[in-house]
Amino acid sequence: MKLTAQKKTGLVSTAITIVVILCLVVTNIVAYVLTEKYPITIDLTSNKAFQLSQESIDYISKLENEIEITVMNSRNSFASGGEYFEQAMSVIEQYEKYNSNITLKFVDLVTNPTWASQYGNLDVDVNDIVVSSGENTEKLTVYDIFNVQQSWYGASITSSNAENAMTGAIMNVVTEDKPVVTFLTGHEESEDSNFESILEKNGFEVKQIMLQTEDVPEDTDIIVSVAPLRDYTEEDIVKLNQFMRQDTESTPVIMYFASSEQSDLPVLEEWLATWGIGVGNGLVAETNSNKLISNNAFYGVADIKDLSYTEHMARTDLPIAFPFSRPVELLFSTNMGYTTSEVLSYSETSGLVDENVQKIEDIVLSGPITVAAQSVYTKDDIQAKLIVFGSDMLTYADFLNSSSLMNMEYMLSCFNTLAQRENVFNIAPKVLGGGSFTLNQGSLLMYTVLLVIVIPVVVLAVGLTVWVRRKRRQ
């Protein structure tokens, strides 16, 4: 019985279909076997969120130290926390790939509860990451590897800081000679352990001294005074001058943060004046809603005037919140070896609120108003630097930890620049999906009008037009 041409065509088509299906099945089996033996991943995200940056790769590939990374959970349990945990896991696993001296292991604290005791006072918990090299150990929590936004509804991860945190932790445990930041106490200074902890996690050694009874440590690179409420003594000033006049290869630095809570501090203010800087009375207010981070005239955004302090920043596209700042005054430009300049300022639409202003509408615009300034003293081979900020709130945890602000990046860049550090990593946080959408007050008002009024009115108008036309046709 002969097959018709139509049947022959059908058989050929069926045979081709079967062969194609078999080829696909075989290809999938081979691909599965290969990926099981040689894991292959392709990062298709636009910001390469699942890969290490070349900057990190270049650094870790040259390390000769033995480094151990321990994740306090099983791999599957850690990665099951969500897409950001998967991203962090992908990043963490790559460190041992680029250096054979780096080892990664997972310890499930649920089945091995006594394991954490070997880390002493680190207080290790589930999902913490411990980075060790020799006797140096550093712990990272989920709040270190992720940027977390708190709200009335709970906490949510807005971006990943995994690579920055991991590379920074590795640098901390292998680096012996760290810049020393000494915080002054004894004058009722504002104390924020979060600020000091951030510095420690980013490669600084932090010390505290009571200036009345202790000398400034010889290895100090930067002195920090945060909003003292009691005045300094003449003996305190002598110690500060000794620090600033020392003949060293590095430049001694003092960072002073003023506060709206302070009363007159005549001795300290006189010393600041010798450097050409004064801190005025009253508060700086911003009248432009686009320059505010909340519906409060004192929650203004600072403009960067000295770009040298942004050199170590991975991004400069977010605002720097500078709330409740006193005005900072430049008393002279140059004098007797001192040279002053602006560092940060409020915009041209800002003004000063003092005892003569009873309400915001009474503000007389006098911007731009300086809210941070520096003075550099140079004599022969000696150079010293004083930086004065008009508000201590720049260092508050709420602003440093906010992923919609640039406060942390800016402050770290300032410290890294002042300490003259070379190996500094500041990798921009990685956002998965659509990312966050930051609105200032002006934009918020515009979108509110658009979404609540304009669009509903347009939809209603179109609907009424269609309804009227249909009624007329009936």
Image: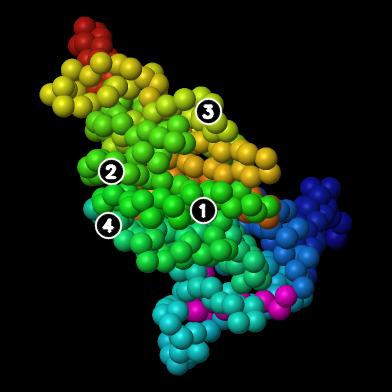
Q: Which residues are magenta?
A: 65-80
Which residue is tagged 2?
A: 265
Check disc 3 and give the amino acid type. Asn
Mark seen at residue 188: 4
Which residue is tagged 1?
A: 242
x then y, percent, for residue 73: 49, 79
Q: Which SS class for mark 1?
A: helix
Which residue is tagged 3?
A: 335
Check disc 4 and give the amino acid type. Glu
Which of the marked residues, 4 or 2, is nearer the chain's N terminus? Answer: 4
Which quadrant holds residue 365?
A: top left
User: Looking at the image, which residue is at 56% across and 56% down?
Assistant: 221
Nearer to us of marks 3 and 2 is: 3
Marks 3/1: CA–CA distance: 20 Å
x then y, percent, for residue 35: 73, 70
x then y, percent, for residue 334: 54, 26
Which of the marked residues, 3 or 2, is nearer the chain's N terminus? Answer: 2
Nearer to us of marks 4 and 1 is: 1
Q: Are marks 3 and 2 in contact (CB under 8 Å)?
A: no
56 horizontally vs 238: left or right: right
Check disc 2 and give the amino acid type. Leu
Check disc 1 and give the amino acid type. Gln
User: Looking at the image, which residue is at 59% across and 53% down?
Assistant: 246
Query: Is residue 205 shown to the viewer in this render?
Result: yes
Q: Which SS class for mark 3?
A: strand
Residue 33 falls inside the magenta stretch: no
